[in-house]
Image (cartoon, grey):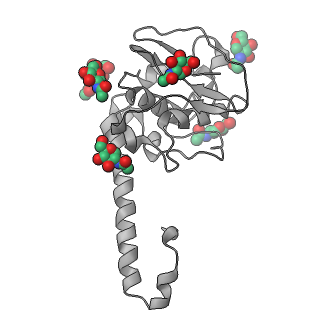
Amino acid sequence: MISIIVPVGVFIAHLLTLPTVQAQTSNVTCLPSFNWSDNSLGQSPCLQAAWLQAECNDGNWRVNSLPPDYQYIGPTSDNSTENACICTTVVYNLLSACGACQNLTWITWTTWSFYCVDYRYIKEGTYNVTIPYGTSISAWAFDLPRNHNDTFDISAAQNIGDLRLQIFLREQEVYSLQLRHQPPRRLSQPLAAC
Ligand SMILES: *[C@@H]1O[C@H](CO)[C@@H](O)[C@H](O)[C@H]1NC(C)=O
Ligand SMILES: *[C@@H]1O[C@H](CO)[C@@H](O)[C@H](O)[C@H]1NC(C)=O
Ligand SMILES: *[C@@H]1O[C@H](CO)[C@@H](O)[C@H](O)[C@H]1NC(C)=O
Ligand SMILES: *[C@@H]1O[C@H](CO)[C@@H](O)[C@H](O)[C@H]1NC(C)=O
Ligand SMILES: *[C@@H]1O[C@H](CO)[C@@H](O)[C@H](O)[C@H]1NC(C)=O
Ligand SMILES: *[C@@H]1O[C@H](CO)[C@@H](O)[C@H](O)[C@H]1NC(C)=O
């Protein structure tokens, strides 16, 4: 299956399907200014969203690029489109960022989750399915839309991304300072621990 897209302003769409092969793919190229939104494996939010949604679809999901004036949407009134993957703020944030990184718009969490009737129990900020091997999820994707007027907030997400990078750099700095104060034999230890 692929992420459903609709023109801006349209809410309900027909489900588009593709022949299934085991794959998590996206042909979106994010703008360079969204490089902070990639995960540690260099995967864009679009590809991360494909990985997470594939968990609820036999390992298959594709996120296609948006034509101008289109948006990604959540489940439709067809209840086969709702599941424990798409009905999370995590997938919502990732696909919102995926729209944003194409310089396009995104919908609110309330609109996204409107037809998530069987999955209201999933706590916001959690992804209630196993995160598959082959991906890792960016920290900002766990932020709560309700802290940002019910929507994905680019600068808030970017701050979390930047913050993580800064903390990482600071840890590395601290680690190398410690190394300098230790006996020389410790210097051969790998830095990978941080
Ligand atoms: C991300 O892009 C910004 C400019 O938009 C650039 O300054 C920065 O070096 C880039 N970072 C990486 C890790 O590529
Ligand atoms: C991605 O694939 C879809 C479906 O084949 C196509 O409509 C779209 O133009 C492709 N986008 C890019 C950037 O290649
Ligand atoms: C979808 O709705 C039908 C009819 O109301 C119901 O029988 C079915 O169990 C529902 N499926 C899911 C996945 O909720
Ligand atoms: C993003 O879209 C706006 C119009 O909505 C346009 O003015 C701007 O040049 C676009 N930016 C990029 C990087 O494509
Ligand atoms: C995860 O799903 C289970 C049911 O499958 C539910 O009992 C539990 O409360 C959910 N946890 C979160 C954090 O949403
Ligand atoms: C929150 O969103 C609503 C509707 O989307 C908008 O009218 C309002 O101005 C927003 N408030 C803030 C503080 O951004």
Looking at this view, is 25 or 96 the one in front? 25
Q: Position of residue 183 (x, y in %)?
A: 44, 91
**Relative to residue 148, is residue 130 depicted above or below?**
below
**Relative to residue 132, is residue 49 depicted above or below?**
above
Residue 19 seen from this side: yes
Residue at point 56% right, 47% down? 136
Looking at this view, is 171 or 152 the one in front? 171
Residue 114 seen from this side: no
**Relative to residue 43, is residue 89 depicted above or below?**
above
Q: Position of residue 21 (x, y in %)?
A: 73, 28
Quarter of the rendering containing residue 78: top right
In the picture, which quadrant includes the N terminus? Answer: top right
Residue at point 34% right, 42% down? 158
**Relative to residue 47, is residue 175 depicted above or below?**
below
Residue at point 46% right, 19% down? 66
Q: Position of residue 83 (x, y in %)?
A: 64, 26
